[in-house]
Image (cartoon, rainbow, N blue to C red):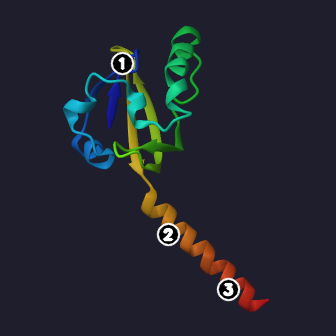
Amino acid sequence: IFVIDRKCIIQMVNAKSCEVFGWKRDELIGHNINVIMPPGIAEHHDSYMTNYIKTGTKKMIGTQREVTAQRKDGSIFNCKLGISETKESGLICGFILDVTTEKAAEAEILAKQRLTEKIID
């Protein structure tokens, strides 16, 4: 779990997120959330938030989707991201689930299906 303010600054992060991303809590608190985003996404994130604040149009808030994230060591991984907003405080809460293991299992199943289809054909 990450909690950010409307300026995209991390206000809170739980221990599991620190473990998954390889950061210490004090290395994240007070920094922009884009530190956990890969290049290409990180550069645009603040403008997405600015657009939301100006227009009220939600593109990610209230949704859950698969995205890529970046660990402190620079490695990129797939995760599911769900975002919600607390109207009273204006804070945004992101729930992140590392799906690396699930993706590997899916790839293995697909490879076995293709092999089975080749054998049958």
Looking at the rendered structure, the kind of residue marked 3 is Thr
Horizontally, is 114 left or right of 24 in the view?
right
- The residue that disc 1 covers is 5
| Secondary element type, mark 1 | loop
**Residue 87, x across and y down, in percent:** 40, 16
Q: Is residue 68 left or right of residue 92?
A: right
The amino acid type found where label 1 is placed reads Asp
Please name the residue shown 30% across and 43% down the image.
Answer: 17
Distance from disc 1 to disc 3, alpha carbons, whole Å, reads: 50 Å
Task: First in sequence, mark 1 or 2: give its number.
Answer: 1
Tag 1 and tag 3, C-beta contact below 8 Å = no
Residue at x-position 56% and y-position 34%: 40
- Residue 116's tag is 3
Nearer the observer, 33 or 2: 33
- Label 1, label 2: how many angstroms apart (C-alpha)? 36 Å
Is 95 above or below relative to 109? above
- Quadrant location of the C terminus in the rendered image: bottom right
Identify the residue position indicated by label 2 in the image. 105
Give SS at disc 3. helix
Residue 61 makes an appearance in the image: no
Which residue: 25% across, 26% down? 29
Residue 85 in the image: state x and y as whole percent.
Answer: 41, 24
Q: Position of residue 4 (x, y in %)?
A: 35, 24
- Judge from the rendering whether residue 44 lies leftward or rightward of residue 31; answer left or right: right
In the rendered image, residue 11, in percent from the top left (x then y), is placed at 28, 23
Occupied quadrant, residue 2: top left
